Amino acid sequence: MEEKRQLAMQLGATHTIDPFNEETHKVVKKLAGGGVHYAFEALGKTQTIEQTWKLIRPTGEAIIVGVANLKEQVELSVGGLLAEYSIKGSVYGSCNPREYLPQLVDYYKKGDLKLDEMITNRIALEDINEAFAALGRSEGARTVIEFD
């Protein structure tokens, strides 16, 4: 989504890719000189999990954050195993919340973590169905429910 790519650039991304008009893994490998050390998948789709595997360089890690249908299977090339690729899941960033949440709050207070800029819509609870419909259409970055 063009809107999301523009937001990513505003929040500090150095490059964005239109996956509908560019071959993502080829562009990333060219930009990163053979692939990236770490690639994160956050959509929870088998297609993007498989794509994430293709983005990493030898000894790189594919980190799967998104939750796909647990009954689905992914196909990974054996060549990646021989190149010492690794893949792992991550639940809540695999962190200790007591340790890291205060750090995240500090980053936010200093302006280093731009959460406000990620909010594209604020709604009342009674508008939740429209928010889910917008999510299904991939509209906006983050919606926040505000309670009166």
Image (cartoon, helix red, strand yellow):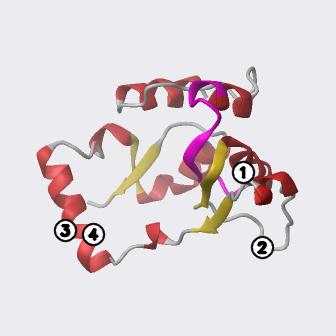
Residue nearest the observer in this picture, 124 or 64: 64
Tell whether label 3 touches label 4 (CB within 8 Å).
yes
Judged by depth in the image, the label closer to the viewer, 4 or 2, is 4
Asked if residue 95 is among those painted magenta in the image, a careful observer would answer no
Q: Which mark is residue 67?
A: none
Judge from the rendering whether residue 52 lies leftward or rightward of residue 75; answer left or right: left
> In this view of the protein, can residue 93 be seen by the observer?
yes
Which residue does the image show at 26% across and 46% down from the upper left?
Answer: 113
Residue located beneath label 2 in the image:
70
Residue located beneath label 3 in the image:
102
Which residue does the image show at 66% across and 49% down from the upper left?
Answer: 58
SS class of the residue under badge 1?
Answer: helix
Judged by depth in the image, the label closer to the viewer, 4 or 1, is 1
Q: Give how far apart the Cα atoms at labels 1 and 3 are.
A: 32 Å
Tag 1 or tag 4, which sits nearer the N-term?
A: 1
Tag 2 or tag 4, which sits nearer the N-term?
A: 2
Q: Give how far apart the Cα atoms at labels 2 and 1 are.
A: 18 Å
Looking at the picture, which amino acid does disc 2 mark?
Answer: Leu
Q: Residues within 10 Å of mark 4 (few under 14, many from 20)?
A: few
Residue located beneath label 4 in the image:
100
Tag 1 or tag 2, which sits nearer the N-term?
A: 1
| As drawn, 147 above or below 107 | below
Asked if residue 41 is among those painted magenta in the image, a careful observer would answer yes
Tell whether label 1 touches label 2 (CB within 8 Å).
no
Looking at the picture, which amino acid does disc 1 mark?
Answer: Trp
Tell whether label 3 touches label 1 (CB within 8 Å).
no
Q: Which stretch did the figure color magenta?
A: 30-44
Q: Give how far apart the Cα atoms at labels 2 and 3 are.
A: 32 Å
Judged by depth in the image, the label closer to the viewer, 1 or 3, is 1
Judge from the rendering whether residue 109 lies leftward or rightward of residue 45; answer left or right: left
Tag 3 or tag 2, which sits nearer the N-term?
A: 2
Which residue does the image show at 46% across and 72% down from the upper left?
Answer: 94
